[in-house]
Image (tube, rainbow, N blue to C red):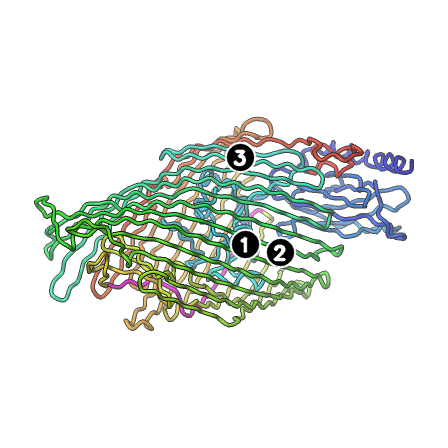
Amino acid sequence: MRKIVLLITGWLLLLTGTISAQQHQGAGKPGNAGAGSIYGKLIDAQTNKPVEYASVALLRADSSVQTGMLSKPNGDFIFENINFGHYIIKVNFIGYQPFFKPVQLSGKSSNVDVGNIKLAPNVKSLAAVNVVGEKPAFSMAIDKKVFNVEKNLASIGGTATDVLKQVPSVNVDIDGNVTVRNGAPTIFIDGRPSTLTLDQIPADAIQNIEVVTNPSAKYDAEGMSGILNIVLKKNRKAGINGAANAGITSLGSTNAGIDLNIRQEKFNFFINYNIRNRKSPTNGRLFRKNLGSDTTNYTEQLENGDFYRRFQTGRIGFDWFIDNRNTLTISENITAGNFNRYNNQVINESDIHQQLVRYGNGVNNTLNGFRNYTTQLGYKHTFAKEGEELTADFTYNYATSDNSSTYSLQYFDPNNNAIYDPKAPEYRLGGGDGKTIYLTGQLDYVKPLTDKSKIEMGLRTNNRTFDNFTNTYGKQYPSGEMLLDTALSNNYHYREQINAAYVSYTGALKDFGYQVGLRAEQSNYDGETRLGNKAAYSIKYPISFFPSIFLSQKLKGDHELQLNYSRRIRRPWFRDLLPTIDYNGQSASTGNPDLKPEFTNSFELSYLKDFNQKYNLLVSLYYRNTNNAITDFYVDTTLNLNGQSQKVLLNYPINASTRNSYGAEFTFRSQITKSWDVTANANFAQTKINASNNGDNLSNQGFIWFGKVNSNTKLPWNLTLQVSGQYESKQILPQGERKPNWAVDAAIKKDLLKNKALSISLGLNDIFNTDRSLSYTTTSFSEQEYYRKRATRELRLNVNYRFGKMDTNLFKRKNNKSRDNNGGDMGGGDNF
């Protein structure tokens, strides 16, 4: 009987808030903007027992009700999917004095635990609050930039590679190599390493991209220019909701996917599936002037073909909200497909007068299949004290691959007569497989000491094992026998283990903030070649320390100034160490088992200014000093391939003495009108590479810059127009340079149906068809020009349909409590 009376009393107290909320529908209604959750527990101040069925309301700035609920029998309450901004928790219940508590949701604290609220006859004053509007496509803080992928139209239907091309501060070349401020970053997926490549991640599965240019000791020390974190979508809205999409392009590419989420009470189940079929015609030209001791001749190599990428990926998992302070998450991601390249090649060889001596025709095809399995297990515990939390997670990546290749080249004289001699006809077949296992475990703890200070600490271990097996057979002349070519075959085993621990302290004195941290990492590498000239190496690096210091000063008028320092490392990737030759016509590449890690001291001074929440300016001055810098090196050499000696230009990584870079980056976001915003990013840098330690007195330096502009305009009739452009100046190489590159993309989207549930987008990538790679390399024996172009001008049509939300009363309790009694409508008040 008592519970019935309490329940009725609670509902009567909520009635006034309900009417107020209905009167304010639309004023503070959350959309698809950045959102989070607020939760806590009600305790009787005298008995310390939970208070059940108390009215808990979430107020807006004008004291109107955003949403509300009744506390559960254990005193828990939770509000989910709440837009970022300032709010007030109001608790009303018979026998207790009203209770008020201001809270704030933001990108830095999207899940707020207000702790144990003791209901006592004390009234807390109401603090002044501001309401933050819709989340922009690009937001920036003093220490991190966040790119909202859902707002980006140009990458719809593409992959993570297409997404990163749109992100300010990030550059992506024609081969998908990513740089930030002209340096290689570390790329994470949901904050953890992965065996997936960027082209294996659908753009439609990505929530946002986080760019951290100078990470603190809390983050991995790997990555010369910081960290790119790809955050995948995971919906936690109540009821059943999701989205389905499909698309087609002018190049014959297709894509489709579905994203489904079911949330009720303590369980959140999510599943998504995407399939991609992409086709990219490619062509290339290598022109080399060969400088011999007694004569000069010329070689031209032409290639054209198609690059096919077919893959599908699925992700399934669930969150179990054991209670307000304990959450368990399990997910599984499976990706499978194939990347196939079909290339026709022509080689023309000319004399000193550039008169044709002979030419060759053939093919260079590679077929690659893969499967990737990623299992993640995570646990989070939040304490009663706001900000105190313990998280633990484990990630298991298992990937398999198979490959096959066909290479042929038949020479002819200028009169089209076939040339047959032991050095001329070439025909090779290859095949093999590989396996990678990647294990990551991490434990993090955050302990607030005061309102302005906290200590963070954690442990992490990474363990990766890689096995690769390839047999390449060459056709002998004149017998026609196929023999194993040990120079182009491999049986390689590689293992690395990296263990780390960190601690950092954050404090503040009025408007001056500081953070000091220290990270310790120890790593072991073992490699073994089990074919041909068998060799093995074992590298054990002792504990290295990576300190970081962050100093910030908030100034009057929404200014903030930050000075930071961190020490970084870039370890050789296993392919950098793999001593296997990849041969293509007159060029070849291989790894370098003697390669050492490079260490970078990174300094950055940043200034952030907010102008009336409409204009944001971020200016960063940075300096990076790198020792043992890893860079590409070219040398003319003779290789023994298939029993024959062939002169090639060999490319492999080396450790240069130093690389010094200093520059300035400017990022400006302007909300010009309510319907038009522009984000501009420009980076200017001076780079010098010194590789004189390799005996050839190699060094090069030069000024480089790149910039991006993203414009988003809301038009009448529910139309959105997006235009983006990027420019990259020439890049400095130890033995040459890479020429400038630029491209422009545009897309338009039409929203239809109620609540804009249906969207149709039409985009044109690389409007002027200018995206390509052109580089020049000079050695003691050659001068080379290398041009490559992939078909990037592509018209994309995509359709997206969002459905939900609706409550199906899944996982009903035995007593069939109403939906509001089990936590209310977690969607922010639509049905409250």
Apparent side of residue 597 relative to residue 484 in the rendered image (left or right): right
The Cα atoms of the two marked residues, 1 and 3, are separated by 24 Å
Magenta residues span 614-636
Vertical side of 129 occupied by 821: above or below? above
The Cα atoms of the two marked residues, 2 and 3, are separated by 45 Å
Q: Which residue is mark 2?
A: 557
**Closest to the observer: 612 or 201?**
201
CA neighbours of label 3 inside 10 A, class few (<14), some (14 to 19), many (20+) = many
Vertical side of 8 occupied by 227: above or below? below
Which of marks 2 and 1 precedes in the sequence? 1
**Closest to the observer: 141 or 265?**
265
**Closest to the observer: 112 or 652?**
652
Q: Secondary structure at mark 1?
A: loop
The x and y percentages for residue 1 are 91, 35
The x and y percentages for residue 554 are 62, 60
Q: Secondary structure at mark 2?
A: loop
Q: Which residue is mark 3?
A: 258
Residue 448 - label: none
Which of marks 3 and 2 precedes in the sequence? 3
Q: Which residue is mark 1?
A: 192
**Residue at the image position 11 percent from the left and 55 percent from the top:** 351
Vertical side of 565 occupied by 374: above or below? above
Which amino acid type corresponds to the residue marked 2 in the rendered image? Gly
Contact? badges 2 and 3 (CB < 8 Å): no
Q: Secondary structure at mark 3?
A: strand
